[in-house]
Image (tube, rainbow, N blue to C red):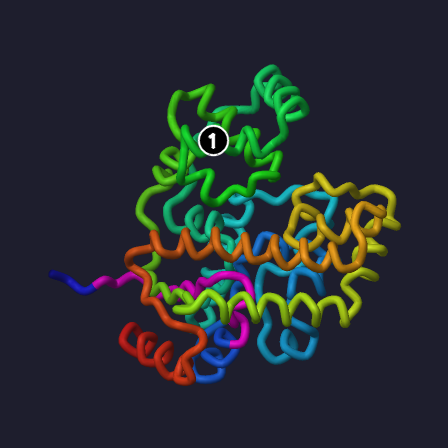
Amino acid sequence: MPADARPLAVFLMGPTASGKTALACALRERFALELVSVDSALVYRGLDIGAAKPDAQTLARHPHALLDLRDPSEPYSAADFRADALEAMGRIRSQGRVPLLVGGTGLYFRALQRGLSALPDAAPAIRARLAAEASACGWPALHARLAELDPAAAARIGPNDAQRLQRALEVIELTGRPLSEQQTGGTGGPFPWRVLKLALVPAERQQLHARIARRFDAMLAAGFLDEVRALRGRGDLHPDLPALRAVGYRQAWEHLEGATGTSAFRDKGIFATRQLAKRQITWLRAEMDARVLDPELPDLLERASDALELFL
């Protein structure tokens, strides 16, 4: 069987707060790698502290492609990401280096490697009816309906993620097929890169929970609420925009509007982040071709380096 002649791309995946950025930067110190962000919050300018965007010092030493591409008022889709990522990967290859794509947005990784299915256009009448049902019984009730019709989609969509719940149920009504089934059948032909997937999955969930709490507190100390105050002060943003549905930002927005006290806001922010991590781990466990690494192991960098050396 002939050797795979496609150029190499490395996917470094993992739940939020698992240490992906630190490992990516350490690997770049050892190998001819260039970093590409795979994060649906980091594409937005002004979402810095709450999105755990690498700081200026880190970016000066280890630049990341696909950061700060959009204003928070502007949309950015998985299709946009795929086009931007393929362009960045081609540029990195032309420099004689290997792209290392690092992040936790599973939909972006999936869209990049498998392509995008042709989903139906929006149906305003169906959307209006679903919104009315949600007003009457709440989005969690519609999430329960989605869990019956499409368990895979429900596992990665939060019970109060109105836009994505509405779209998933809309697609099912329009096509008679689960959204998750249609999203796995991408278009665009074979992926032109051979891929090494490294997945940071903690063996003990409690250690990740502790990391999440520490990082959230560090964000608060660094001025996260001031960051959200500045976004609210613009006057043209609202919490239903995709950018501001990012974990932490919605909870901070509600807190600044007086909906929660300081302690309740912190608890809700940490809980929402833990739920995100749970969904990300569920998705990662379905990536059967990924090499799983425990981020808490002291020899993490050596294990990741060993895996990478086999492919270079």
Please rate how many residues cluster around mark 1, counting C-alpha atoms within 10 Å: few if below 14, some from 14 to 19, many from 20. many
Could you tell me the amino acid type at mark 1?
Answer: Leu
Q: Nearer the viewer, residue 113 or 136?
A: 136
- Residue 202: x and y in percent read 42, 68
- Residue 64: x and y in percent read 58, 68
Q: Quadrant of residue 183?
A: top left
Write the start and end of the magenta stretch as one range: 4-22
Describe the element under mark 1 as helix, strand or loop.
helix
Please give the name of the residue rendered at 32% of the width and 67% of the height, measured from the top-left corner. Answer: 291
Q: Nearer the viewer, residue 219 or 263?
A: 263
- Residue 160: x and y in percent read 61, 39
Please give the name of the residue rendered at 48% of the width and 76% of the height, measured from the top-left corner. Answer: 23
Q: Quadrant of the image for the C terminus?
A: bottom left
Residue that mark 1 sits on: 146
Extreme-left residue of the structure: 1
Please determine whether, in this image, residue 281 is positioned above or below residue 206: above
Q: Quadrant of residue 124?
A: top right
Please give the name of the residue rendered at 71% of the width and 68% of the height, measured from the top-left corner. Answer: 219
Q: Quadrant of residue 285?
A: bottom left
Q: Nearer the viewer, residue 3 or 30?
A: 30
